[in-house]
Image (cartoon, rainbow, N blue to C red):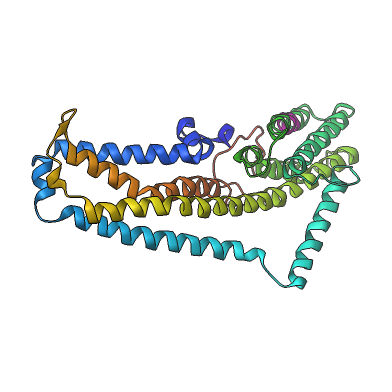
Amino acid sequence: MRERADGDTRLLWLLLDADRWLVTALLSAVLFCGILVVGLLHPTPAPTLLTRGDPVETLFQALITGTITAVTLVLTLSQLVLSQELGAVGDQRERMDGAMRFRADVADAVDTPVSPAEPSAFLRSLVRGTAERAENAQDAVDATTLDADLTALLSSYLEAVRGNADVVTDQLEGGTFGEFDVIRAALNYNYSWKLYAGRRIRMSYADELTDEIDDSLAELVETLELFGPAREHFKTLYFQWELSNLSRTLLYVAIPALTVAVTSLLFLDVQDLVGVTAGVPDMLWVLALATTASVLPFTVLLSYILRIVTITKRTLAIGPFILRETDRSVDVDWE
């Protein structure tokens, strides 16, 4: 995906590749520093603001209510998503039959008796299969005398397929499902454009292509068509995996966050904090730290959702639909 992105690669790394705990820490640091900066730059001194009325009590009351509500809602939604895996035996058998038929189709497409069981190996076999089909098509092109422009077009297209496939195959090598590396490698294979270009070339130059070249391109297109459902299936499984991790992580951080919020509400009296450390009032240090800890469930949620929505935005369409700019190695647009 990064190879096809037009935006800042550092931002993309933060959204997709970075460890979610690191993203959570960065978001928490931004919140912590923001509270300190605003407290120091405000024209009214922080001690005056924090002792005027009951802003601290109001803040932590709202945080307690918001944390309980948000965690409960997220866990409920996660369970609703995961409940799709539950069903009667008939439904499960239909899913099983569909999966077995698809695996058989992939095995036929990549010329193997049984398709691999592990997601990374399964995707790697499909990607490698497209490279082999492209190589066969290139051999057919080399053995045939065609118009120079058509030969250049075919060679450019097939070289792009092989080059991208080789890179993605290396990225999938040794990948473990559950880690983002497998999904990232699959998203780096822009099969949508390759599928469109292959079909477009076959239609536009049907009268000029030999039967051997046309058959080779048809096999390539067929293999590309299988990659789309496979990628979407594993992407869905990855989302379910991430939601499970999110639910578990929220449970881990919710109790400490609530403990800090409740303790601050019951026992924190900012009027007792009259000292100054590093030029910052102690009450501002304590308030910033307690607030950041209390908001930890939200920052954890945000760190996971950022990755999920970024992947979703970049993979909205399946098949030969291209919703954003991508690497277009050949020009096969309609005239």
79 up-or-down from 289: above or below: below
Q: Residue at 36% of width from left, 57% of height from top?
A: 67
Q: Quadrant of the C terminus?
A: top right
66 up-or-down from 230: above or below: below
Relative to residue 158, is residue 209 drawn left or right? right
* Residue 172, visible in the rendered structure: yes
Is residue 179 located in the magenta-colored stretch of the structure?
no
**Residue 164 spot, x, y in % from top left:** 69, 32
136 up-or-down from 48: above or below: above
Relative to residue 55, is residue 115 drawn left or right? right
Relative to residue 72, is residue 1 drawn left or right? right
Q: Which secondary structure dominates the residues rendered in magenta? A: helix
* Residue 318, visible in the rendered structure: no
Q: Nearer the viewer, residue 316 or 45?
A: 45
Is residue 161 located in the magenta-colored stretch of the structure?
yes
Q: Residue at 81% of width from left, 44% of height from top?
A: 116
**Residue 120 spot, x, y in % from top left:** 72, 41
Q: Nearer the viewer, residue 320 or 164?
A: 164
Relative to residue 329, is residue 207 drawn left or right? right
Q: Residue at 29% of width from left, 39% of height from top?
A: 32
**Residue 99 spot, x, y in % from top left:** 78, 57
Which span is picked out in magenta? Answer: 157-163
**Residue 248 spot, x, y in % from top left:** 52, 53
Q: Nearer the viewer, residue 240 or 105?
A: 240
Q: Quadrant of the N terminus?
A: top right
The quarter holding residue 193 reads top right
